[in-house]
Amino acid sequence: MGSNRLDSSAWFQRNSTTGRRAWLRWLPAVAAPVAIASGALIGSLPAGASNPLPAKTPAQVLELAASHQVQTFSGTMEQSAELGLPELPATGKPSGPASPGSVASMIELLSGKHTARIYVDGKDNARVQVMDQLAERDVVRRGSDVWFYSSKDNAAAHLAMPAHSQGPADAKDQAPPKDMQGAPGLHTPAELAQQFLSKVDPSTAVSVGSDVSVAGRAAYNLLIEPRTDATLVGRVAIAVDGENGMPLSVQVTARGADKPAFSSGFTSLSLAAPDPSVFTFTPPPGGTVKELPVPDRSREPADAHQGAMHNGAKGRVAVTGTGWETVVGTARGSASAAESMLQDPLLSQAAVAVPGGRLVSTPLLNVLVTDDGRIFAGMVAPERLQAAAAAAQ
């Protein structure tokens, strides 16, 4: 089908509230912008679809994606980041909790390739298995019970979810103990797509390219291009299932580049209900098991569950800027996070000295570690990170 463009200003005015609300069920609660900047999958575009889909305008494809209701599926995802950083060992991650949005999770996903199996059955049952070369890491939710497991250490942790939990994404959002390096930090294409679709405003051009095929399913190729040169992103391609609107892959190309540096996609996918046994977890004999306290979110600001937290609280995340120019930074008192980030010798070698701290630079993401132990990350030029750090003094 031919490419055509959307008046993104008109679409944004109609959907800035209702469209985004539909996406929130996929959104992890902690530091989502950092997670999006750090995830990456598949380095090549999906194959073209053999049977053309009915023609749709960009606005219609956006609506299809925003309104999808798929909550039962299983499949395999592959992830790779081609950002010019040294590949970190699959089982040699920095210490600290590897929960989504954590520094350990972010750095792990900045390089190399990752494979994960995902199982979801409704709002209360989910399992994510990250398959490392010599180990497996799991997050398993069944009802109110959540388990974290690392086969490398044969270590497990259990959490009883509070009654107000919203769905499968909440299971991945919980953090394991600091001495257990086991929880996956991967995000589904739907979660990644939500972040980029939330940036669709008058500063964004949206079009639909030729149909593609992902995991054997025909999909619309939704193309999002920032109109501002303040971001490192040149284009985002989202494969939207032509039947149900579920995002099947996300690929991000840096400004001026020809190939995606950041991608996320299914290599296999079934919409049938997974076998219930996959949501049952029993700690293997001889392993360690820890019981985790229930996180108290009653004092968090209202916008915390949309990825933005107020500055000034120890260990919390501050979000400055909007859209493609968003910068995420940790508040004062988070020096341990900076130490965790730079403790890997390969990554420390990649960090270069700049005024005010050390910089890890890639085609799509820049990360600034300040001299006082704060971290600022964004898909923007280093100068914008330094400005955000100075403004937060």
Image (cartoon, rainbow, N blue to C red):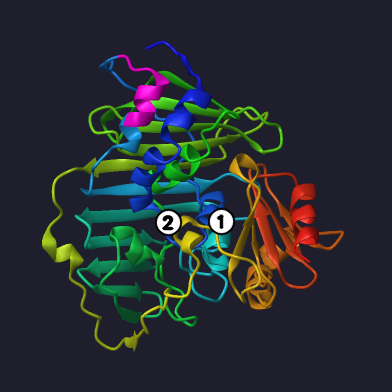
Q: Classify 353 as above or below 36.
A: below
Q: Residue at x 46, y 67 (%)?
A: 99
Q: Could you tell me residue 289's position as x and y percent? A: 32, 86
Q: Classify 194 as above or below 169.
A: above
Q: Could you tell me residue 241's position as x and y percent? A: 29, 31
The residue tagged with tag 1: helix, strand or loop? Answer: helix
Q: Residue 214 carries which label?
A: none
Amino acid type at circle 1 is: Val
Q: In which quadrant of the rendered image does the N terminus lie?
A: top left
Judging by the rendered image, the residue that carries numbered circle 2 is: 186
Q: How far apart are marks 2 and 1 (CA)?
A: 12 Å
Which sits earlier in the primary sequence, circle 2 or circle 1? Answer: 1
In reply to whether residue 178 is colored magenta, the answer given is no
Judging by the rendered image, the residue that carries numbered circle 1 is: 34
Horizontal placement of 334 versus 8: left or right? right
Q: In which quadrant of the rendered image does the C terminus lie?
A: bottom right
In reply to whether residue 61 is colored magenta, the answer given is yes
Q: Could you tell me residue 96's position as x and y percent? A: 53, 76
**Furthest-top residue in view?**
2
The front one of 270 and 191 is 191
Identify the magenta region: 55-63
The quadrant where residue 128 appears: bottom left
Amino acid type at circle 2 is: Leu
Q: Residue at x 13, y 65 (%)?
A: 277
The front one of 307 and 342 is 307
